[in-house]
Image (cartoon, helix red, strand yellow):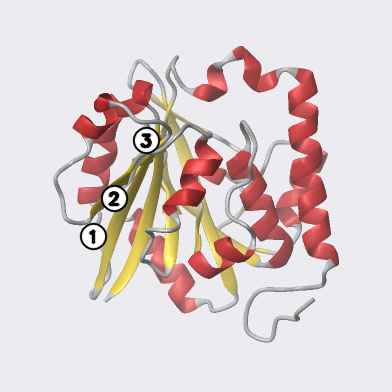
Amino acid sequence: MGVVSVITSVHAPAAHHLADAYRSLRAQVLPTGWDWQWVIQEDGESAAVAGAVPDDPRVSFGQGRRGGAGVTRTLSLARAEGAYVKVLDADDMLTPGTLARDIEVLERNADIGWTTCRVLDLLPDGSLVGFDRDPPDGPLQPGAVLRHWRAHNYRAPVVPGTLCARRELVLAAGGWMALPASEDTGLLIALDAVSRGWFTAEVGLHYRKWQGQSTQLPAHTLPVEWDARMAVIEARARALAATGWRYGPGGSAP
């Protein structure tokens, strides 16, 4: 049986959103012979999160000392059983068909290492708002995300929170970056440096906007830390590209 491991990092303030994320997972209809595994890792150890984890044999739950989303997601890889890993933030929701579309792209294209998809922001009033400058549906060549990100004031052309990637490729890239934020962008751009990706134009995620999320905190955009995060993300991607390694059939080794 094929398995896609859905990885969720969660901290106590977002525990109450897990129920919506779970409902979105249960609504997924996967190709014949496939199932999902939900790997939830708490950034900390709280009764609030433990009590919100659903009783489902497909759910694997872990807790540990705080280290940020990058650390918790990377720890989750130890329990991820699937050939593919899919990111799902605790406060977001997959749309119907998302996992099936990710699986179909990766099963059909052996040289594609990762996928992303269109996102709609879910605002506090319940309305959905989209982005009007998504890339076309289809493949993204190595380096395309980095070039766009660098040229557009560090805004990626695709949303890292929709990433679905081959587990072996995520491991080869070192997992999520050990950064206080932007760790998901760091992984996306690292994968972009060594492999072709794919953008699916169908909406695959509802990205919840709420006051408690980390990207809304003032520290997220403090210049000193921001500049350092962007610099190390770019440096890692360029160093990976410089090795000459490319993922996929016929890919070169460093």
Residue 179 screen position, x and y as percent: 65, 37
Circle 1 SS class: loop
Crowd tier of the residue under label 1, counting other residues whose Cα lies within 10 Å: few below 14, some 14–19, many 20 or above: some
Closer to the camera: disc 1 or disc 3?
3
| Sequence-wise first label, 1 or 3 | 1
Asked if residue 112 shows in the view, the reply is yes
Residue at label 3?
Answer: 90
Name the secondary structure under disc 2: loop
Q: Image quadrant for the N terminus?
A: bottom left
Seen at 76% across and 54% down, the residue is: 237
> Which mark, residue 29?
1
What residue lies at 36% left-to-right and 63% top-to-bottom?
4
Percent x, y of residue 135: 62, 50
The label shown at residue 96 is 2
Drawn side of residue 231 relative to residue 217, left or right: right
The amino acid type found where label 1 is placed reads Val
Q: Nearer the viewer, residue 185 or 63?
A: 63
Say whether residue 179 is left or right of residue 24: right
Residue 163, numbered circle: none
Closer to the chain start, of discs 2 and 1, is: 1
The answer to whether the residue labelled 2 contacts the one labelled 1, judged by CB atoms less than 8 Å apart, is yes
Tell me where residue 124 appears, x and y as whole percent: 37, 17
Q: Which amino acid, mark 3?
A: Ala
